[in-house]
Amino acid sequence: MRMTLEQAIQKYGPIVDGVWANEAKFCSLLEIPSDIGGEWINSATGLGVTHIYVNNDMQAPLLQALNNVKDRGLLGELHSFDGCLMIRAVRGQPGNLSCHAYGLAIDLDASDNQMGTAGTLSPEFVKCFTDEGFTWGGTFHTRTDPMHFSLAWE
């Protein structure tokens, strides 16, 4: 499902002045099973993760990636949920819309996987997501972003 920004605009509609008029049409809450959400903390609330507001097109691959993490015994690497849908530009690139703007990216374990670092996620953990079509920000060439997993441009 990996798409370009132009394809996202065509499919989901434009974002104008920080407002995505079609957000409610294309996004909803994804329920996170309790056997995955458990100790995983939402960094904004400090509570366990029970739901994530995300683009509907990302729900199935995200849920499968999280099930991969569980099935491969890697839940101990999953500490925090640090964002999905946020209408904004790519950090450090004003005017370049982030795939977070359409809810097509997720940030995990931000405190241990800061931009510009190698991060702490194991290759096995990363593979849980890349097996489902996600691109991992730890492989970005201009600046690494190891907390970031996306199904779109960047």
Image (cartoon, grey):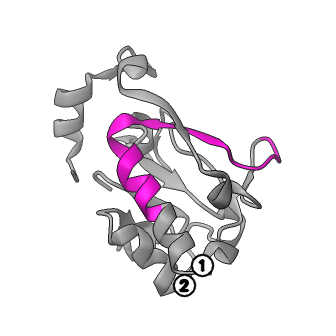
Q: Which residue is mark 2?
A: 122
Among the 4 quarters of the image, the one containing residue 142: bottom left
Q: How much space separates mark 2 and mark 1, taking CA atoms?
A: 9 Å
Assess whether mark 1 and mark 2 are in contact (beta carbons under 8 angstroms). Answer: yes
Q: Position of residue 31 (x, y in %)?
A: 56, 41
Among the 4 quarters of the image, the one containing residue 53: top right
Where does the magenta region start and end? 45-65
Within 10 Å of disc 1 (Cα), the crowding (few <14, some 14-19, many 20+) is some
Look at the image and say whether residue 113 sits in the magenta stretch.
no
As drawn, 134 above or below 27: below
Residue drawn at x 20%, y 47% is 4
Look at the image and say whether residue 48 sits in the magenta stretch.
yes
Q: Which residue is mark 1?
A: 74
Secondary element under disc 2, as helix, strand or loop, is: loop
Within 10 Å of disc 2 (Cα), the crowding (few <14, some 14-19, many 20+) is few
User: What's the residue type where badge 2 is placed?
Assistant: Ser
Residue drawn at x 40%, y 36% is 55
Q: Position of residue 93 (x, y in %)?
A: 42, 49
Report the front residue among 94 and 71.
71
As drawn, 72 above or below 38: below
